[in-house]
Image (cartoon, helix red, strand yellow):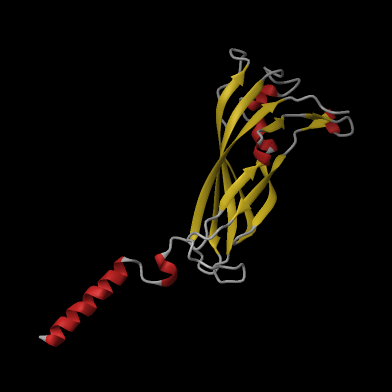
């Protein structure tokens, strides 16, 4: 009877360990919690659809719009004592995807095309050490996006509303993995982009 009881206790303990995900790294969703602190200093991006430049063919160009992103990577639990040199002390950003939602087309009733902005994805390889801030520049409004309606309608010379403005919400999803475990994780952020044909500086 004593040996049977011992066997039952061991079996129950093993089952509990399996249900809890084991011990060590598997007991925690992720050792760190990658976070975005700010985009463009907290200000909306004013994205110019066309830059006049007489030194280039066609009299100008469509610019790529990049802004500053500030990331942090604190431990996911207060009891974790991690440094960047530890096996799980760095989170690697692998890619990001931006989805665009048109909020306003101004002035209203001005002949804008139907909103149809495709999502944009790009690979990156950026390490986020634990307990540190990392600043980098990423493209938020690529030139290709400005060739899509209704932003294309703002283009000088060819657009139907070259004097207008398109207000867009950008929903950004970052995807990466924890160094040492390859555990994948994603997090999101939102910002605003104001597309227009802004006056160019001399």
Identified at 55% across, 55% down, the residue is 34
Residue 14 image point, x, y percent = 27, 75
114 over 17 or under it: above or below: above
Q: Is residue 114 left or right of residue 158?
A: left
Identified at 60% across, 68% down, the residue is 83
Residue 81 image point, x, y percent = 53, 68
Whether residue 14 is visible, yes or no, is yes
Q: Is residue 177 left or right of residue 135?
A: left
Q: Outermost residue toward the left?
A: 1
Q: Is residue 163 left or right of residue 184?
A: right
Whether residue 141 is visible, yes or no, is no
Identified at 60% across, 54% down, the residue is 72
148 over 95 or under it: above or below: above
Residue 58 image point, x, y percent = 83, 29
Which image quarter: residue 198?
A: top right
Instruction: Give 26 or 104, whichever is nearer the viewer.
Output: 26
Residue 62 image point, x, y percent = 75, 33
Assign the C terminus to one quadrant of the image. Answer: top right
154 over 21 or under it: above or below: above
């Amino acid at each position: 009877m004593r040996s049977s009881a011992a066997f039952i206790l061991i079996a129950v303990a093993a089952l509990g360990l399996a249900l809890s995900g084991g011990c060590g790294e598997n007991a925690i969703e992720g050792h760190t919690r990658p976070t975005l602190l700010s985009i463009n200093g907290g200000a909306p991006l004013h994205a110019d659809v066309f830059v006049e430049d007489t030194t280039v063919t066609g009299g100008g160009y469509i610019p790529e719009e990049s802004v500053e992103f500030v990331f942090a990577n604190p431990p996911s639990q207060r009891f974790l004592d991690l440094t960047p040199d530890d096996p799980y002390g760095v989170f690697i950003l692998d890619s990001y995807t931006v989805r665009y939602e048109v909020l306003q087309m101004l002035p209203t009733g001005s002949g804008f095309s139907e909103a149809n902005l495709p999502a944009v994805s790009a690979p990156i390889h950026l390490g986020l050490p634990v307990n540190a801030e990392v600043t980098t520049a990423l493209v938020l409004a690529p030139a290709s996006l400005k060739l899509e309606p209704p932003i294309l309608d703002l283009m000088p010379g060819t657009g139907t509303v070259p004097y207008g403005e398109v207000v867009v919400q950008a929903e950004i999803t970052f995807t990466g993995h924890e160094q040492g475990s390859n555990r994948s994780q994603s997090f999101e952020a939102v910002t605003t982009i104001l597309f227009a044909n802004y006056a160019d500086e001399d």
